[in-house]
Image (cartoon, rainbow, N blue to C red):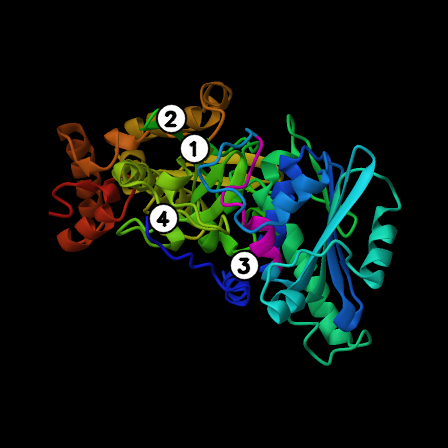
Amino acid sequence: MDFDVAAPDPAGMVASLSSLGYSLPAAIADLVDNSISAGAGNIDVDFTWEGKQSWITVKDDGRGMTGPELVTAMTVAARGPSSERSHTDLGRFGVGLKSASFSQCRKLTVSTFANGVRNTRTWDLDVVEKYGQWRLLRNPGAETETLLKKIHESGDQGTVVLWERLSGYHDTTVTSEDKKTQAQFYTEAERTEAHLAMVFARFLVHPYRRHIRVRGSELTPWDPFLTTHPSVQRIPEEPLPLGAKSVRVQPFVLPTAQRLSQDEYDSAAGTKGWLGQQGFYVYRRDRLILAGDWLGIRGLRREEKYNLARIAVDIPAEADVAWGVDVRKASVVPPVSLRRHLERIARHTREVASRSSRQRGRIASRAHGDPLMFAWNVKRDDGRILLRINRKHPLVKSAAEGRASEAEAIRAMLRLLEETVPITAIRMLHETDTIDDPEPFGGPGEADPETIAVARRVYEALLEQGRSPENAREVLGSMPPFDEQQGFWNS
């Protein structure tokens, strides 16, 4: 076999790994992945401001590493994506620790305990570039060693990852007294806290129950689906086959603003706002990979009317290649074989979400809208919910103002119906807003003969009350439930 060995230049490789596009929160999330894979129950992320000498650490109480294991962990791409991994391993390419760290700092130190022995190794990118070699340092230097002893003082187990010479801070003239830059530094800490609470939400609750803290503040899991809220709609889960495994898809339609407290509404908006958070949420081994995205499916754009649509997708770790999970664990490309199914599920979820938004909008508009529009008026009065048949509705008005003997009986019947709405039975049968909501006259589509007969009577009542035929059809065409059906009023 005739060949050349074309080893990459270390400086060029460092530059490539440093420019993969990690945000600071995403880079720290990669380090937390390693802590979780090591079985850590407690993970602390700390930001310390000291001007150009500021530093960031991720400390855990996991298994730790022996000297050889640490060298392997610090080696770029020591394992390929097809290497066998434990069921708790959240990594894939073997570059996460290095690429994430090199994107944020010029000096990376890992100090870890195994069997009571501390092992430490350091990547100093200035050294790598100076000598053109992957020189993994055994001695991190006096200043770094002092920091490590301070960080390790609370115990002799687990692992500490230390970032020094932070990008954007070390190579500037900033001083520790620079309050504006200091505020920016700690704003990044807040962004990191929110990001980790979203990405590792499933690990912060039973049965995983990891404790993750940022600057001493324990994370509260952010649930994009409001799974514990009584008004969330769960569309049935669907398993999609992918080779010998399956992908679980669970759509949710969130409650409208009227069903949420202000705090719930603000929290559900997440870090990107309601519009930015709609779409698919892709999880791999319960770690969130992608949050709020329509996966590039043709024709699925972000629109306000779909803000309530969120879909959980759980992919097996073995499907990484099929899903095109990138190094940063920040984007995916769904397999061709699943795209039509994902599109079908997304379109159905979006339609349910849009319909829910429209219905809630109508409830809100009852107090201010056209009195001809709704057959029922719904409002709160002195803490009580009042349901009243709309006396101004053309059909009701026509019946109630007919012959005196009939009108009296009709008015009595209306009062009886209003006072005996079977609220308790409705709640027992239908505790939440779900997709089995009854739809008037069979729902959207072509109107059936019975619907047309009722619509015809409303139309005639409008004519009797002085409306022109054109205006009567216009009113009827905007009146629920006829506004979603096809008949003589909009033909």
Q: Quadrant of residue 412?
A: top left
Q: Which numbered marker is on residue 22?
A: 3
Which label's residue is closer to the chain start, 1 or 3? Answer: 3
- Relative height, residue 106 to residue 476 (above, below): below
Amino acid under disc 2: Lys
Q: Position of residue 235 (x, y in %)?
A: 39, 30
Q: Nearer the viewer, mark 1 or mark 3?
A: 1
Amino acid under disc 4: Leu
Amino acid under disc 1: Glu
- Relative height, residue 146 to residue 71 (above, below): below
Is 94 in the magenta? yes
Residues at discs 2 and 3 in contact (Cβ within 8 Å): no
The local secondary structure at tag 3 comes to loop
Residues at discs 2 and 1 in contact (Cβ within 8 Å): yes
Q: Which numbered marker is on residue 318?
A: 1
Q: Nearer the viewer, mark 2 or mark 4?
A: 2
Residues at discs 1 and 3 in contact (Cβ within 8 Å): no
Residues at discs 3 and 4 in contact (Cβ within 8 Å): no
Residues at discs 1 and 4 in contact (Cβ within 8 Å): no
- Residue at image point 62% right, 62% down: 104
Left/right of residue 366 with respect to residue 194 in the rendered view = left
Marks 2/4: CA distance? 21 Å
- Residue at image point 74% right, 53% down: 138
Residue at mark 4: 295
- Residue at image point 72% right, 38% down: 66
Residues packed near mark 2 inside 10 Å, few (<14), some (14 to 19) or many (20 plus): some
Residues packed near mark 3 inside 10 Å, few (<14), some (14 to 19) or many (20 plus): many
Q: Position of residue 294 (x, y in %)?
A: 37, 48
Q: Which numbered marker is on residue 44?
A: none
